[in-house]
Structures are given as C-alpha cells and as structure tokens.
Image (cartoon, helix red, strand yellow):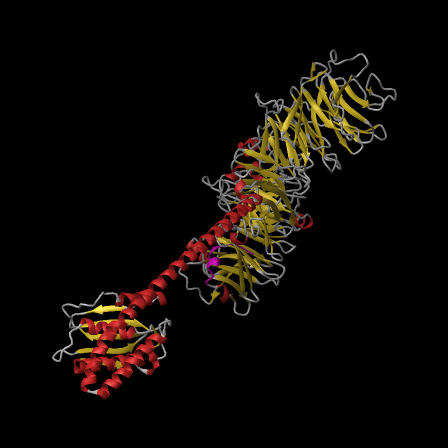
Amino acid sequence: MAGKIRIDRWIRIGLLVWLIGCNGWLDAQDQPAHYEFHHIQEKDGLSVNIINCFLQDRDGFLWVGTYDGVNRYDGNQFVQFKHKRMDSHSLLNNTVHDLCEDQQGNIWMAVEEGISRYDKKTGKFTNITTVNTRALGLCNNILCDRTGDIWFTSSRIGLFQYTIQTGQFKYFPYDSTSNPLTTSSYVSNNGLLEDPSHNGLWVADGYGLHYFDRNRRQFLNHRNNPQRLPIFTRHYVSALALDGDRLIFADNDAHQIIMYSLSNQQILKTITPISRQSNRAVFDIATIFVDRKHNLWTSSWNHLLFHIAAESGEITELEHDKSRPTSVAGAFFWSAWQHPDGSIWLGTVNGISYTNPERAFYSVYDIGSLFPPLNDERGIHCLVEDTDGSWWIGTSMRGLLHYSPQTARLDVYKLPNATAEHPYGKVLSSLSIAGDMLYLAGETNLFTFNKVNKTFSSLPLPAPIRQRKARLWNILKDGHYLWATGESTWVFRYHIPTRQWESYPTLPANTQRSYMLSYLFKDRKQGTWVDLYPGGIARFSTQQKAFIVDEHTRDKQYLNKVSSFAEDSAGNFWMSTNGYGLVRYNPRTHRYANWTESEGLAYDHSLAALPDRFGNIWVGSYNKFSVFAPQTNRFLNFSLPYSPDNLEYINHLIPLRNGHILGSLKGYLVEFSPEKLVKQPAYLPAKILISQVNVGDTIWLNHRDLAGVSLKAGESAFAVHFGTLTSASEPTFDYVYQLDGYDEDWKPAADARYAVYTRLPGGDYTFRVKAVLADGRSIPASTLAIHIDTYLYQKRWFQALLAFVVFGLVIGFLRYRAHQRDRLHDLQVQASRLERDKTEIQYQNLINHLNPHFLFNSLTSLNSLINSSPPQASDFLRKLSIIYRYILQNKDNELVTLESELSFVQNYIDLQIARFQKDLQIQVNVPENYRTQRIVPVTIQNLLENAIKHNVIEEENPLVIRIYAEGSSLFVVNNLQKKSFVATSNKQGLASLKSLYQYLSRRQIEVQETATQFVVKVPLL
C-alpha cells in the first residue's frame, strides 16, 4: 500500500518524559494505515483549491469544477474558465457544483445560479437561469443520461429534465401537489444518479431517498412505497454512489452507510465508521466514492475521511496532518475520480490529493515519529534483519533500536558506552547477527547483545585498534569468527570461542600514506572480500593467510568513492559511488562498467546499491532512487517525499528474507517490493493529449470534433501544448514531436510539454507527438492538422497569374525589343552599306587620284628613258602596263593575297627605283608563311607612294623603306626626312585605308611617328 506508515503518535508524550538510562518499548499496534498522497494545487495552475467535482471527457481531458471556475487539465497545465461580467457567453457562475458530458461532447455544469453548457466547437457558454419564469437558484447536481437528455436538480426546487432535441424543460415534483413555485426540499449534493438497469433516477434529499420512474412519470419514496422497500424512510439521505447493481448511500439519521441490491431489492450491508478521535461524530456523510476494487472512500461534514476495504471490511481513517506533507491535503472532499492507472484523486478543500494503493511497491515506516530523538543526528546508521522478520537498527548516537513491522513495536536500548553527553551511547557503525546474539561495532567499542535477556557485553578490541584508539567500521559474523575492519591497514578476525584476535595484511602492501579497510562482504562462494579505501578490493587467501588485492581494481578513480558493495546472482560486484554513479565489476573477466546521470541514473552521488532477486539493481541516493535493469540497460527513477531537505544521513539497503529490500532514509525505513515492479509494468496511457495551440493571446482548445487549426497568414508563430494524465507514482515519459511538412525528423521535447514554431510559410502541416517509456514501450503518436493561410502574393494562383502577366510582359518586351532590334539592324545595315559605299568611293577616289599622278610621273620618266636608253624604256613601259592591269583586275576585290600584292608592288618598286636610282632604297623581307594571308589591294603601293611623296629623296639622304612581316601584321617603315611642303597632298590616303580596314576587320591600321622614322602597321587578314 503506497506510503503505508506504522507509527504510534500518543506514545510521543511518554517519550518526552522518558527517563534517560531506561530501556523501553514503544507499542504502535492498532494504528491505522496512512496513505501517501501527492497534491495538485493553486501553485500548479488550479484556479482555486476548493474542489467540487471531476469529469473526464471523451477526449481524455479532466474537467475540475471548483469554487472559482472550471478547469480543464491535460496532466501538465490547466485551462481556466470563469465568469466575465461583460461576456454573456462566459461561465454563468464561478461556483461549479457538478459536471456531465452529453452525447455531442458538450460539457454541462450545475452552478450557483442555474446551469451552463460549454460548446467545445464554438468555445462559448450557454446559460440557463430560469424555468417557467422561476429562478433556478443553486443547482447542485447534473447528469447526462443514456438517451441524451439532461437532468439536474435545483437544491430548493427539485428535479428538472431538459430535452436537447426539443429544447423543452420539464419539472417533476415529489408529489402531485407540489409545483416549482411552492416546493421546498433541499436536494443533497451528490444526490442524483441514473439507475444502471432501469429507466429511472435516484434522488437524495433531507426527506429521504426517492426513485423517479421515467416510464410512469412518478416518484417512489417514503410517501409512495407500494412494495414497502426498506430503503424508503423519512431519513436525511446523502452521498449516492453506484457499485455495479448496488446502490450505496448514507442514512445520516441512522448513522449508517447502506449497500442496497437493485436487482434483489434488499439491503446487503450496513457500515458505521467510527473515528478514533474522541467526541468526533462521523455523520453526516457528504461523499461516497467507490473505486474499481469496490473499496469505499468517504468524507463527512465533520471533516473525517475513511477508506473502507471491500474484502476485509477494514475501516481506515485518513488523516490530514499539516506536519506530514504526504497526508491528504484537506479533511473534506466533495468528489473523487479514479485514474485508469488505479490512482484515486480526491477533490478536497485544499486542492487535489491522489494516491495509488493498487500500484504501491513500497511501505514506509516512520521510526522517527515513534522515537523523535532519532531525527536529531544522522538517524539510522546500519541495519540487520532477524530470523523472525524484525529489524535491528543501529543509530547515530541514539542507541540500538528493535522494530517489528508485524506489530509496529519499537524497542529502544541504551548502549553501555552511554554518558551524560551521549545518553544513548555513541555511533553504531555496523551490526551482525547470529542466533540469539547480536554483534555491534560502536566505533571505539565492540559489543554483543543477548536478544533473550536483553543484555550487553563488551568484546576486546584488536590490539592495534585499542592502542591507537582507532575506530572500527565494519564487522561480519562468519561461523565461529567475527571479521572486523577499521582505521588500519590490517584486517582482524576474532575467534569467538577462544576470544583471540588474528591480524591479516593486504598483499601487495599498499603504498598509500593513509588508507582504511572498510566494507566486508561474503560472496556466493563464501569468499571474504574487503574494500581498501582508496586502494581497490582484496580477497582473503586461506593459503597465504592474507588479503590479496585484485590488481585490476587498483587506481580506478571511482573506487576512491565507494559507498557500498553487493554481489548479484551472476557473481558481479555492484558498487555505489559518491560522485561516479553505479559501478559493476566482473571479478572473472576483470571488466568494469559505469553508469551515471548521463546514462539515466537519478543521481551520481549514490550511497547504496543492492541487486534484487530478479536481477535488477536498486540504487539509493538520499530520497532519490533508481532501479536499473541490466538486461535492457534502462533506469526507472523515482523519489520519496521523505527527508528531501536533509542530507545529514546515509542510505542503507539490505535484502530481506521475503525477497523485499529494506532501505533507510534518516528516521524512515522503506520496504520495497521488487516483485510488484516486475509483475506490474508501468501504466501506459491510451494516447497523448494535444491540448491546445497558442497563437499570441489566442488559444485554440483541441477536441475530438476539431478537424484542425486554421491560422491566418500573419500567425506563423505558435506553440502546441501536450501532456498525459498520469500520477506521480508512474514513471515519466520521453516525448518527441515532429511537424510534418517542416521538421525533417523527430525532435526531443526534454522537460518541456510544448513545441514552439516561428516564421513558418503558409501551407498545410500535421503536428505529431509520441512518448516512450523507460521499458521501451511507446504511446502511439497523436496528431493535429494545422493550416496556415498564405499571403496573397504567396498564393499559387496569384503567383501563377503574376507569372502569366510577367511572362506576357516579357514576351511583349521581347517582341518589341526584337522589332526594335530588327529596325536597328536594318539601320545598321543601311549605315554599314553607306559606310562601305563611302569607303569604296574614297578608295576608288584614291585609286583614281593615284592613276593620273602616277601616270604623269611614269610618262615623264619614260620620256627620259626613250631618249637615253630605249631598252630600259621598253622594260619600264612593260612594268607600267602590269601595274595598271593589276589595278584594273582587282578594283572590285576587297582583299587579295599578300603574295599577289607583293608581286604587284615589286613592279611599282622597280619603276620608282628606275626614277630615283640610288636615292631610294626599298627592302622587302616577308617570309613565305605570311604570303597566303590577305590584304586590301594597293595598300602597300599607297604606303610607298605616301612615303615617297612626303619625304626628301636625295643622294646625300636616300629614303630607306623597309617592308617586313611580324606577328599578324605587315610593317612599312621609312626613315623620317619630311618635306617642308607637299603640293599635291590632300591628306586622304591613310585615312581612306584606315576606314576601309575598320570596315573589313576589328583590327585597325596603326601609325606611329617618331623623331627618326615613320611606321605603319597593317593588319593581315
């Protein structure tokens, strides 16, 4: 049973005056069990702590009616609904007495001034305050029946029916003379139920129990009881409840809880709870709740709470104790609800308190409440179990305790070393038991305690311990021997029959300046081991008469902080460490494994570790515990609400004969039941609740009929909240979520119960969330469709239209540009044609200009030759004829080969040489590979003529002209000796050539004039 504590409170008075030096016993028999409760209150988001009613709707959310509005709970956060004076669609009144859900999923509420209906689809309330002009007043019960109608009671008027299909109200008086204007009968809270088998309703009020037959439209009660049923009396009846076909109610006049069989129409049982508190009357009963195991949970107007077990009939009074935070939060509850995991949720006047006796896997024994001085120091220091199942407890300066969990009896024994400063004795560091003898290590003392005659005896200390006044830490009974370790480098063994000590070293000798031998333990093969702090572990060798250190355990950092040793069934050693978590050492393979918080351990500062019979490892870290399953490599973590703010103690875990594990937490003992964890896997919720979507100040509440959330284009930032309705006794889940259409993979939620997204583009998304338990089981993913509108400029049809318009504009522009380009091309062609014509005209003019000028000079030369040398004159005339033939042949050609141009120019050169003799020197040096390239006709001839025309040609200063090819150009270079005046020059020769070459090629004729020479660079085409 969760949090079951066996204590004796009245004995505290006697304990306060207990004389020092007296041994005594504290008896806690016949004390009631106390359940361990967890609480949900205003600090957790509840609107107010005064709870009136519960309802779990078909979507899985828990609705909580309070004295300050109604709350919807998803297991993580509350959404509050309250009355708003200026909003007619808000809750009618903040005092909500009862809740039900109709077949359409609407939530109906009985409130202080009438009834309210919450429409999940619209998020609005519809309020009804009057029927036939009569104010309803306080409505305290409401139910939605199997046919879809709504039934409710006005506390001062009676029973009403509302038919959803017709929207009509009907009033049903208890007798024919009653009407809504005259009836005055106070209907009890929790006073309306639908019969599970018949077409009728049960109503409880101050005048008894009433059954309304819907078929006959009449009431059966003490006034109308033709069958003389024993339940119809004129007694004050309240707290109706159903348990199958059994009707359960409180007859407050008879001071009885009555169980009535609806099928047999007989009273099956009556129960009369009695409080242990003197002068406290139990009745009147306000609330009866029946759990799924038929146990009753009751609350009375006198603030008394009871649990009545169905099988045993045991009545347990539940106490609200302000000093004990695990007690029920308040001494009164109006309503209760059972979670699918079996936990009971009580709606008290101080918040929600829940407990789960079905799934409890530990019982708590508050030894400190029986013996308050135990809480003053470090509390419980060591433990050992006796053969009768009782527990011997060594304390920190509070003596020796003996506790029987069967009888709840506690015996306290003062140690022989008690003084005025330490009235109970000094610290007990270790216990060991054998038969009727208990062995106690008291740091600087060693005792035995005879369990039969309750006497202590002292044992001699080992000589090194006694001489140095060192402390003993651990003792271990082994047959006729008692092993002991302490502040020494030796292990001691005491032979009980001869009362002699033996000393054993550790080999090889430890080189540490200071170390001690602490934990002693026996392995499964009865080998004796000792922990060398901080030097590893050693096993006793009977042959060498020494403890041999396992070299593989030396120099391991975490072994410097070992706080406990234990062996599992496979022979592995498990060690808890202070700061390094849980450690496993296999002495056969000499391999270590280590688990810390990074691997799932609750806390790295582990104080105790112990394997159970199922192979799981229990780890204690103050009030935090972990159960490690080596098979799955997973941890189950939980914490106990005991000594959470106190670290002045150490944990101890010991195995019990019944297979349980006993642990200590300062003044508490906790008995763990490992088999319950194995046989009862953790509760797995059916689904994860996606509760709401927050967009700025707007909240979208999720429900079954919500197809999805539709957000505006500007609402691209939102948060999705989710959770599961679980109790604190269940392990937590690891949540992961994903937004399909945006997230590529699942994202871990860590400790958050929401997912935030910002700046999402418009579109359709699906939010998914799932959870995984520590044992590998998972809850299927829950989904929610989310649509985000797209801005006009982002919509596909708009983009398509825009693309079409742009495409049209582009096409129009391209067509316009093509048209303009065609026009420009035509103009360019015309301009080119004109330019070409102009160039050709200029070139022809040049040639035409050349012909008479050249002809005049040639004829003059010819005339001179005829007179002086007729043969030369004949040759001169032949070459002149060749020149003019070349000009006539190529006058229509734009280009000629350099070979033909040079052949033509050679004739022209010969004529000029004949004219100027040695005064003119022309050198032609053009390799053969250049001669196939092309050139404009008579280009070289024009350049030669231009050089001859503008330069002085004298015998003393001959004109030297060089013609050569280099790169992709032809060079015509002459020495510069300008004439002062050229009579026939019109300065058009070179310009015409430049224009012609610019037309034929991108390359131009380049002219360079220096002080000594004139260079013309003609491109070869």
In the image, is 335 to the left or to the right of 648?
right
Task: Out of 479 and 774, give the one closest to the viewer.
Answer: 774
Whether residue 401 is visible, yes or no, is no
Instruction: Quarter of the image for the N terminus: give it.
Output: top right
| 584 shown above or below 187 | below
Rendering quarter of residue 215: top right
Q: Residue furthest right?
A: 227
Residue 799, percent across and down? 54, 45
| 598 shown above or below 189 | below
Task: Out of 22 and 887, give the one closest to the viewer.
Answer: 887
Residue 46, percent across and down? 57, 31
Q: What is the magenta range?
A: 555-565
Task: Out of 386 and 253, give the one closest to the viewer.
Answer: 253
Rendering quarter of residue 34: top right
Residue 69, percent across and down? 60, 26
Q: Residue furthest left?
A: 956
Residue 48, percent across and down? 57, 28
Does the stretch in magenta take in 792?
no
| 846 shown above or below 567 | below
